[in-house]
Amino acid sequence: MGQYFLIANQNKQQFIDPFRLPVSEKIPALLNSDLIYSLLPYLIVGSQNRQYLKFKEAGFYTQKYLGAWYGDPVDLLGDYDEEELSRMVHSQFENISIEVAAIIFELKQDLMYQILDETKSGATVWLEMIRAIMELEHPPASLLFGLKELFGKSWKEELYRRLA
């Protein structure tokens, strides 16, 4: 079975649960995930970075989370090795997995279209994440546009049909 991991910021009391994303929670897949590789830099970038302000205005979740973990220790916690801490993080910290994943759809249009293309082949794991992002209070406009482009005006019905 193996050990499952999550990414935690104990200072902010927030975590990313790879299980909520189409990423394996096992360490090799987690460390080699394009999605995680794309997301973490947005969380840890410092405001002194020259490109920071360019990205800061890109969307609701980018504004909220860009640089939010800057300067804080970030832990990769295993459910065996750090069982007690991992359990505490799951029960007491804020799970920001879906909100942070929304940044991809606000900033990385090429990756967004790659993900949407994968859904055409029936990859429901991506559809679950997309559904969760579209249910956020501020879903990215670019994702809505991409879904309409992919599935047409009845994108919501098609999304739920594919998930059924």
Image (cartoon, rainbow, N blue to C red):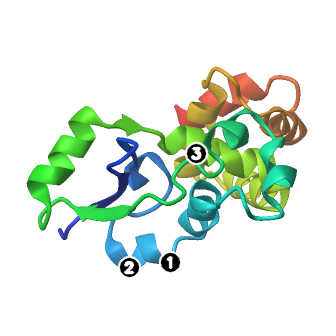
- For image coordinates 49% across by 51% down, the residue present is 21
Q: Is residue 7 left or right of residue 163?
A: left
Is residue 145 placed above or below 79 in the rendered structure?
above
Task: Looking at the picture, tell me which residue is in the foreground, 153 or 129.
Answer: 129
Structural distance between the alpha carbons of marks 1 and 2: 6 Å
Circle 3 residue:
100
Circle 1 residue:
32
Mark 3 or 1, nearer chain start: 1
- Residue 80 lies, in percent from the top left, at 12, 64
Residue pushed farthest front? 48
What amino acid is labelled 2 in the image?
A: Pro
- For image coordinates 47% across by 61% down, the residue present is 23
What amino acid is labelled 3 in the image?
A: Val
Residue 140: image quadrant is: top right
Structural distance between the alpha carbons of marks 3 and 1: 18 Å
Q: Secondary structure at mark 1?
A: loop
Q: Secondary structure at mark 2?
A: helix
Task: Look at the image and tell me whether residue 127 can be seen.
Answer: no
Circle 2 residue:
28
Q: Are marks 3 and 1 in contact (CB under 8 Å)?
A: no
Task: Looking at the picture, tell me which residue is in the foreground, 126 or 91.
Answer: 91
Task: Looking at the picture, tell me which residue is in the foreground, 133 or 49.
Answer: 49
Mark 3 or 2, nearer chain start: 2
- Residue 24 lies, in percent from the top left, at 40, 64
Quarter of the picture holding the N terminus = bottom left
- Residue 87 lies, in percent from the top left, at 16, 45
Structural distance between the alpha carbons of marks 3 and 2: 21 Å
- For image coordinates 50% across by 78% down, the residue present is 32
Q: Are marks 1 and 2 in contact (CB under 8 Å)?
A: yes
Neighbour class for label 1 at 10 Å: few (<14), some, many (≥20)? Answer: few
Q: Is residue 81 left or right of residue 103?
A: left
Is residue 20 placed above or below 18 in the rendered structure?
above
